Every structure is written in structure tokens, then in C-alpha cells.
Amino acid sequence: MKRLRILIRMESADAFELKAQALNNDSRLKDAGISALKFIGDKKYIADGEFSHELPSPSASETATEKNKSAPTPGKGLRVVLRMPNEDTYELKAQALNDNPRLKDAGIAALKFVGDKHFIANGEFSTDRPPADSREPKLETIGKKLQVVVRMSDKDAYELKAQALNNDPRLKEAGIDALKFVGDKHYISEGEFLADLPSTTHKKVRVTLRAPRKDAYELITKHLNGDPQLKKAGISGVELAKGAGMVPVPKETPIQPKKKKRSFLRFAVGAAILGLIGIIGIVGVIGVTGVGALFFANLPAPTSTTVAQIPVSGKPTETATLAPATETNVPPTNTRVPSTKTQPPPTPANTRTPTATVVSCQPPSEVVVAAENLSCRYGPGASYLYRTGLSGGDVVDVLGKSDTAFGTWIRVQTRWEVPVKCWVNSGPNFVEIPQGDVACLDPLYPEKAPLIIFNTDLFPKPSNVEASRSEDIVYIDWQGFDLLPGDLPPASPPYLVETWTCQGGEIVFSPQGWDDTSAWVRDEGGCDQASYGYVYMAHVDGYIGPVTIPWPE
């Protein structure tokens, strides 16, 4: 038997998975004829679950097979699904059509590419799969319960939990006997909590699961290879359904804010009240003037007037200075004329100074969605991941705000049965504020409302982050990672850069989404606080990161 070395270029996620199988000494690798693995950049091979500097010696079974080439190869016809670049696919197809003997040496009897109707075997096209050395056993249902772990959004999870507690008959029709959520201690079956799974039933059930492409292809591969784990789980067949496509994200369609209708009755009543107030004011001024004239008739005119100003916090107001009640032709002098009887008594030392009443800032408690369709996002900006959609007229509660370089965003909570917290633009084209001032809200991001982080060994964080400065512009570069369509979030940029930089003498928060592995931001001088920032990679389940930007001087 000859040893064949094959170089395969694949996605990092698949490479990590294959490496894990090799380290775990997965028997399926040996069944496929793979005796050792070595990844580019590694110094050692992986064989029999251990690291080795050299290739392992041929096993006894391989030596026996080498001596008896005419004996049929033991085992089953193994079907393997590989995802690879187009150029490698075309090259492999050309080798199959040219009947390259290295394929047979590697144990590849036939090839069929996704989308093709025929196999390629012995350099020819064939409608049927070539016969295997032994028939694959047909999987049969053995009545064991299947436990499936499904990752879904919080909203769908709560809805499914509610259906289970309400004993929804659709769950039983789908073959779901019990549910248990991550973190819970009990199962939910027939609307009740149970410590253990209910008794086993022996009916066949057909389950439709929506999963990422990677998991779907892995399940199909296990089924084609007759994986005994599927049989133990009671899975007799697997069928891959075609997806219906992604649902587009509703766009933020700005519309003009609703104008309140003016009532003629309200206008008439207001005018009458203002007229009455004016008449009362005129009569009061006349009365006060007359009394003042009688009271101060015998007093000399003051030579100078001192106005005491009381500091008042808030917006400045206009101060009106009253003129003397009467004018007397007394020549001006710097000496005050003493008064005998009408001089007011001296003010006691412990008399309190009058203070002005300051009206506190009132934040809004709720807002009304003014746009026809409004995106509610995971962070305070249009570059963040889409969380949910709101419709025109929806009323949501306001939790806080975040001031950014692109406007103020507010964090809201829906009034649905299962509330959702997310961020919307506070501009008048997006929401209508019945009362209160957005400026009075407490800032929440990122300390009190942090970003959703999804870090896993399957997807690396952005690496080799560098930053350079050209006057007031800072350029940022990094090395990214290409996610597959099932992991890449739709209608959102693959990278997020958050920066806090000096602009106009103050630190400004600028969240920006970028399609490429480079970004730039303005950073001026004149701020006491140092500028800083982070780089993230976007995933459908959250953000991978953060990675700190080494800020240039």
C-alpha cells in the first residue's frame, strides 16, 4: 500500500474541527484511511491522538493489505462532504475526469459535486453511485429519545417556553415530548415541570431544524457515513431542505413627525384668560402706583439706586428695574438725606436671603415611533447589529441615552409580552417625544448597557491591530477573518470600530462600521483625557472582541 500525502485548503473552522478529531483519536479518520495530520505552521504530526515528529510506521493491518492487494478493502463505502475553494474544486474535478490513479490510491472511488446530477468514476460520468464492497446497513428507528440542542434568540426561546407551559398540542404533533432550557433544573412536559424525562414512546417523528450550513453539512456527512451515533439517537434518515432565503432587515424610513391639530376652542379660551390677566395686572399696577404715591409723598427722591441680584441656576431671565414712583426736583448730591419717621427698620442679621426656585430637568419616560419601520439595534448607532423592528405608532419605554458623533441614541424597552431592550435614533424623523428632554437622560453605554460579546475558539478575534497618525487623522488597520454566510450577519458591516477621540476640545464617542480591515477617525488636541478605541468582528450571535487599539501619540 502506498502512502498518499494530500494538501487541502479549507476554512479555519473546519480545520480546527478536524484537528480536534485527530487529537481525540476519532476512529472515523482511520476508517477514511487518514493515519496522520499535519497543519501548515505546525512542527509535529498528529497520529493516534498524540503529537509526533515523524510519520507513524505502517500498522499491521496496512502491511497485510499491502501483501494481499487482491483482497477487497474491508469497511464501508465512505461518503465525505468537503467544502473547498473553487480553484481546488475544478482541479479535483479535472483529476477525476482524467482518471488520475492518485485518487484511487487515496481510496476515492467516485466524485459528485454539489449541483451536479452525475458521479465521476473511472474518468466517466455515471448516473448511479458505483457499487461498494459491502452494503451499508439501513438505519431503523429503535425508539430511543432524541435530545436536540438548539440555539435561538431570546424572544423565540421565551415563546417556545410559553407554548410548553401551556401544553400547546403543536409541540406533541412535532414529536417534542419535553423541553429543558440551558440553566433550568427541570423539564417541561404536558404543561408541568418534571425532574426527569417522561416515558419513551415508539412513534416515528419527523423534525425540521434550522441550523447553520456548517452544522447541516456535518449532520448530512454523518448520515452518509452511517455514523452509529445517529442510530443510537434514533435518527433513521436525514434530509437537507433548501432555505427560503434571508428576510431583509426593515430599513429606517424617516417620515415627518405628526403635528398636533390646533383647536379653535382652545385658542379662544386661551385668549380670554390672557385678556383677564392683563386687566387684573393693569388694575393692580394702578393701585400699587397710587398707594406708593401717597406713602412716599413726603420722602425725598433717592440719589442713587442699588439693585441686588440673586444668583439663579439654570437659564438667565430678564430682570425689570422699577422706576421711582414720583420725581422731585431735588439737586443730586452724594450725601443721603436722613429720614425721621418713614425710614424702614434695619434688617436683622439672621434674616434668610430669599432664594429662587429652580425647575429640575425632566427626562422622557416613553416615546412613540414616528417612522413607518424603525430598526432597533444592539448598540447606539446604525452600524450595530439589528436586534428587532418597530412599527409606526408603537410606544416604548425609555431607559437611557448615549451621545455619539452622529447624534443621540436612546435605549428603549418594548411593551411586548416578552420585553426587548435595544437602541433607536432619537431624532424627530424616527421617534416622537410627548414630554421631557432627552438631554436629561442618564448615559448608559457602555458601562450600564454593555455590548453583546460572542467569543469562541472557532472564530479568532481581529489581530495585528495597528494605528498611525497624520496630523488630526488616525488610521487603523488590522487582520480580519472571513466568516461564512451562515455566521456573517445580514445587512451589517463585518467590522465595528468604537473610538473616543478629542474633537472640538471634548471627548466624542464615534461608533463606525467598516467592510474592510481599515478605518480612520479624527483626533484633535486640547483634551485632558487620552483618546482610545476598540475593534470588533460582527457575528450573528454578537461581537467577537474587543481588541484594544494601540493609540498613537
Image: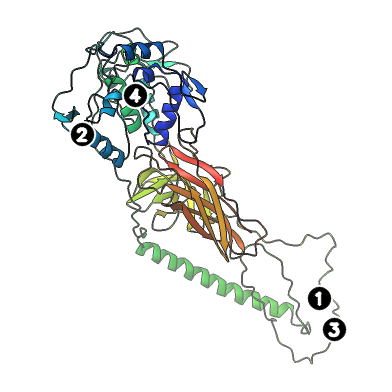
**N-terminal of the two: label 2 or label 1?**
2
> How far across and down, in percent of the image, does residue 450 sit?
53, 42
Above or below, 72 relative to 547: above
Tell me the kind of residue under disc 3: Val
Labelled pair 1, 4 in contact (Cβ < 8 Å): no
Q: Report which residue position mark 4 lands on.
A: 163
> How far across and down, in percent of the image, does residue 533 sit?
56, 51
Q: CA distance from mark 1 to mark 4?
A: 86 Å
In this rendering, the label closer to the viewer, 2 or 1: 2
Q: Report which residue position mark 2 lands on.
A: 98
Tell me the kind of residue under disc 4: Gln
Q: Report which residue position mark 3 lands on.
A: 337
Labelled pair 3, 4 in contact (Cβ < 8 Å): no
Instruction: Tell me: 125 left or right of 244.
Output: left
Q: Report which residue position mark 1 lands on.
A: 342
Along the line of sight, the residue nearer the viewer: 120 or 482: 120
